[in-house]
Amino acid sequence: MSRPDLRARVESARAQREQEGLLRRPRTVELMADGHRLVDGRALVDFCGNDYLGLARHPDLIAALTRAASVDGVGSGAAHLVSGHRGEHAALEEELADWTGRQRAVLFSTGVMANLGALQALLGAGSPPGRGDALCVQDRLNHASLIDGAQLAGAELRRYPHADADAAARQLDARPDHPALLATDGVFSMDGDIAPLDRIADLAEHYGAITMVDDAHASGVLGERGSGTVSHYGLYGRWDIQVGTLSKAIGAVGGYVACSHKLRQLMEHRARPLLFSTSHPPSVTATCIAALDLLMSDEGQMLIERLWENTRLFKSGLATLGFNTGISQTPITPVIIGEGARAMQFSDQLFAAGVFAQGIAFPTVARDKGRVRTIVSAAHSRGDLEEALNIFESVGRAMDLI
């Protein structure tokens, strides 16, 4: 009996995606100011980036990075628990804890690593590695890193229909003998809607479960001073773990887990992405501190308000044109086309006309929910948004989408 050829399977999978018109390649992108990017040599209005507040090029952040790099160099040289935990890291963790209303916070290299590390530490507590008996109940549309984290921890993963708290309760009822953790995105990255954290908190209290939210797309966007969905719902004291990213609205790179002092101690001993990853360069950490300081200022509040003004203008314009924008409640606004190949074609035509908005298709979204995802920034001017809406109208009519 001959062994199946893995190389042939790999090529078949690649060829099938090409045949379906879904094969993409990374474009060469350079960051420009004021809501534009230079993409493959062309200046376009940008709706692909996650730089919600336009902080990636803010002079205060650039100055903080430059100062720290001149003193501390360009790398920390070790993981946090070896010799890589510098004063800047400790200061940033303190600021993150204060910002989110938590006892403590712990830094990870990315938001993905923060999710993987937190779930591994929590769901595997008291069990051999990969053989936990914990139950992890998650929204079906959660980010891949939440799903992967539960599976890597060896937990029993049960997923409920999107935003359906009653279905989540049924999943908890099905395993009354398992310690449980409820995990959800705060803002869902493909549809732009906000999770019902208030109802999930009620469930957790009733069933004695731990709660965890991935606030990657809510950090800097929702809540007091952009502190996230727990603040948005007023759930201080009722929510256990808040994960966020420093790579989107904060304008730099990294992830964090904001939690209790005891949960932080557990992660310091069990979260493998923390234990085996070199810590951030101190210059990046200083940049994040500058970003949080700015968020606490009047300028930061002004940027958040401008983000939401731009969001309302752009959503209203798309709706007036007749595009389907789904259930979005945030600056993430999908333009739902349906067939994946058609969504990719729409994206390509927008690109040719001057708008950078990537097409998204199965398996990232359902087969009949292919879309172009747009993300508005505070860096967009009113003129940028009006120009983009005119292009959406022109391309949409040419393709008989509206």
Image (cartoon, helix red, strand yellow):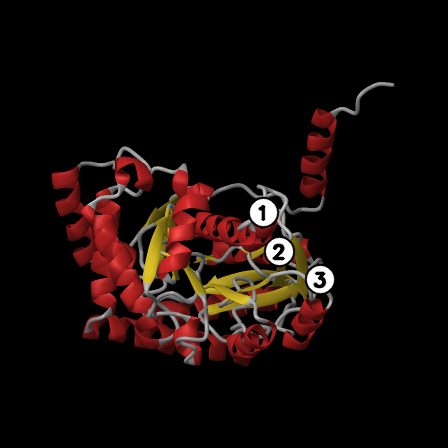
Q: Which residue is mark 3?
A: 368
Instruction: Please tell me which of labels 2 and 1 falls first in the chain.
Output: 1
Compared to 145, does 329 lie above or below?
Answer: below
Q: Nearer the viewer, mark 2 or mark 1?
A: 1
Disc 2 residue crowd, few under 14, some 14–19, many 20+, Cα 10 Å: many
- Kindly indicate whether the residue at mark 1 contacts the one at mark 2 (C-beta within 8 angstroms): yes
Quadrant in the rendering for residue 141: bottom right
Depth order, front residue of 362/292: 292
Q: Which residue is mark 1?
A: 127
Residue drawn at x 31%, y 56% as measured from the top left? 251
- Kindly indicate whether the residue at mark 1 contacts the one at mark 3 (C-beta within 8 angstroms): no
Compared to 168, does 251 lie above or below?
Answer: above
Tag count: 3
Quadrant in the rendering for residue 323: bottom right
Q: Does 255 sit left or right of 24 as displayed?
A: left
Callout 3: SS: loop
* Place of residue 335 in the rendered image (x, y in percent of width and height, measured from the top left): 57, 67
Residue drawn at x 73%, y 33% as measured from the top left? 12
